[in-house]
Image (cartoon, rainbow, N blue to C red):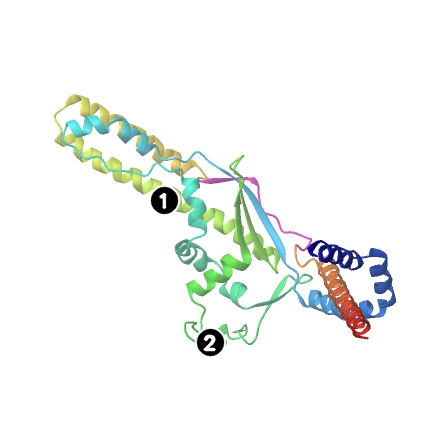
Amino acid sequence: MQEIQKNNHLNNFDYQEIDLRELFSVLWQEKRIVIYITTPLLILGLIYSLILPNLYKSSAILSPTDSTSSISKSLQNYAGLAGFAGMSLPSVSQDNNAVKAIKKLNSLSFFEDKILPNIFLPDLMAFDSWNHQTNTINYDESVYNDLTNSWVRDYSYPQKKIPSAQESFEIFITKHLTISEDKKTGFITLSVKHQSPFVAKKWIELMINEINTFYRQKDKLDSEQVVSYLTKQIVITNLSEVKQAITKIIQDETRKLALIEAKEYYVFDYIDPPAIMEKKYEPQRVLICFLSAILGSILSIIYILTKYYISRESSSLATNSN
């Protein structure tokens, strides 16, 4: 008995197998539905793509320079000798500046201290359009009044009338900035997207200049503090070996101070500098229209097949009941 039921089940399955020719026939008969559903979605996709503003992407490929602090190496070499003499040498991070700089570029503190004071905030928070013929920028009048140079936007807590550093940073990091690292070569790609290609290039150059200046000043201050500290210690100690070691460290740091001042690109050097791009990066209007058409086709096919199989199942049940 079970065998008979099993065979009947298999036979029913065979009858319900999908016939591709039948499907194509059904779709062809209902092609008007495909057109009726796909065409509006295609038009909506076209309108949406035309509403989107053109975005230009300026990129710079960077090579990390050898700016690892020589202080740590010198102090490590003589740490044992200094400890024997009762001296405590200052500790310095051994991480390469380039590694820390990538994190620093993505930080709120760097944006607030180095980027925000050097950009025109409406270019970030009130931008409306860019005229490529006159290279002029128009601002959203509901947010910023260009004539009076005042912010007029509506806002609610935690926002402020003038966009705060945190709000501006969130927009900058999510909508404009991209940083990627090639693990094989160590090269860094820094990219900025903006409606104005001139602003995009300017912001990249600003970030590179500021990050190089930041670590140049930091290493310079570290070296000066080490030299000052060791100059005092050399007077205190009576061991000739320690004095010689301290003198060697002071010489190393003095040479480093000279190199810090002379090196233009301290952390990152350009392999490919940013440029004012002539062609837009986004939106890809053809792709948007193509995806809209694909979506319309899929939805219409699902609708047609669902309707067809429900109708066939209803007819089959009606026949069996009779």
Chain part drawn in magenta: 267-280
Q: Is residue 159 left or right of residue 280?
A: left
Disc 2 is placed on an element classified as loop
As rendered, which of 307 and 248 lies closer to the eye? 307
Left or right placement of residue 91 versus residue 257 in this view: left
| Residue located beneath label 2 in the image | 155
Does residue 133 show up? Answer: yes
The vertical placement of 23 against 249, above or below, is below
Q: Is residue 24 above or below residue 103?
A: below
Residue at 21 percent across and 37 percent down: it is 229
Residue 43: horizontal and vertical position, in percent? 76, 69
Residue positioned 82% across, 56% down in the render: 20
Mark 1 residue element: helix
Is 270 in the magenta? yes
Residue 291, image x, y percentages: 72, 60
Overall secondary structure of the magenta stretch? Answer: loop
Q: Quadrant of the N terminus?
A: bottom right
Report the residue at 16% width, 22% height from top.
240
- Residue 171, compared with residue 254, is above or below; it is below
Report which residue position mark 1 lands on: 217
**x, y percent for residue 2:** 69, 56
Amino acid type for the residue under numbered disc 1: Gln
- Whether pointer 1 and pointer 2 mark residues with C-beta atoms closer than 8 Å, the reply is no
Left or right: residue 7 versus residue 73 is right
